Amino acid sequence: MSIGSNQVNTLWQWKRDPMQGTEPEELSQLLSLLDSVSLSDRSDRWIWIGEGKEDFSVAAVKRTIMKGRGSSSGSKFKWCKWVPAKCNIFAWRAVINRIPTVEALRRRNISIQNSSCGLCKDGEDEVNHLFSGCYVANVVWSYVSNWCRVPHIYAFSIQDLVEYYVRCGLKEPEKTIFQGVMIIACWSLWKARNEARFRNVSVRIEKVISEVKVLGFLWVKNRTKFRSLSWENWCKFVIM
């Protein structure tokens, strides 16, 4: 980069031309940002741009962090006590879009050629498609709604899914159990997606549904007070 008469001239040295995936668009955005850059002959210096004045301090860092927490997207996730921590953590990360989908990896400048959904091969491999727009996911939600005797599950995002138990119409304890079933179903769909993408294992919807029921029964029996629950009643979603 060189400075001419009120102009910034750039000479790119690429290892390869940015012609794949989202790279051309990102380059265009970069050029647009550089158009607004104004350079001078002054010596470089550090400037604190967080909360407070230009002077850096630990208190200013704390205020900046707290302000960032307060201005979050508002995504909420309620922990389900009877579901293992790994499933709760996964669902929470999915809600805040922090699971490694192709779309999320691309935002981190990781180039992946195949961006199709790992479950249905149609649509993009991103959070809301995988769990609410995908054909495979919708068949699973149709089965879950029939099994748990709730209105048909319509969702436009992962947030809608993990909060569906609030408006499902069930009373306790079925309501809390249904919350866990939804989380387990998301977990099982993600596992099926990973097996299809990384091990070339064909996605079988009946296998996903079976895993949801088996894992749910195992964890309800061992992690709740309903230790006498029978498999027959579980298959009818009769908890008491």
Image (spheres, grey):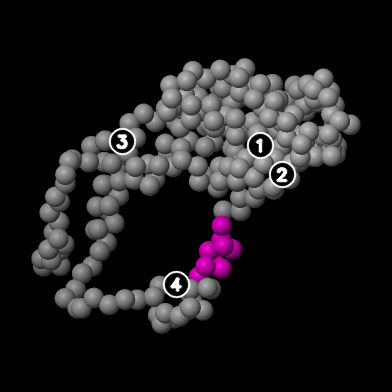
Which residue is tagged 2?
A: 80
Q: Quadrant of residue 209?
A: top right
In the visual, does 54 lie left or right of 174? left
Q: Residue at x 64, y 50 (%)?
A: 76
- Find the residue positioned furthest to the left: 4
First reached walking from the N terminus: tag 2 or tag 3: 3
Residue 168: image quadrant is top right
Name which residue lies at 48% across and 73% down.
61
Q: Kindly report the secondary structure that dominates the magenta region of the rendered protein.
A: helix
Span colored in magenta: 64-72
Question: How crowded is the residue under tag 1: few (<14 C-alpha within 10 Å), some, or many (20+)?
Answer: many
Q: Are marks 2 and 1 in contact (CB under 8 Å)?
A: yes
- Between discs 2 and 1, the one toward the N terminus: 2
Q: Secondary structure at mark 3?
A: loop
Q: Nearer the viewer, residue 45 or 224?
A: 224
In 3D space, how far apart are the residues under numbered discs 1 and 3 (Cα atoms)? 32 Å
Q: Earlier in the sequence, mark 4 or mark 1?
A: 4
Q: Earlier in the sequence, mark 4 or mark 3?
A: 3
SS under mark 1? helix
- For the residue carrying disc 3, how many other residues have a C-alpha within 10 Å: few (<14), some (14-19), or many (20+)? some
Tag 2–tag 4 contact (CB < 8 Å): no
- Quadrant of image for the C terminus: top right
- Amino acid found under the numbered disc labelled 1: Ile
Q: Position of residue 52 (x, y in %)?
A: 47, 78
Q: Earlier in the sequence, mark 2 or mark 4?
A: 4
Residue of label 3: 21
Type of amino acid at the residue the image marks with label 3: Gly
Along the viewing direction, whichever of 159 and 194 lies nearer the viewer: 194
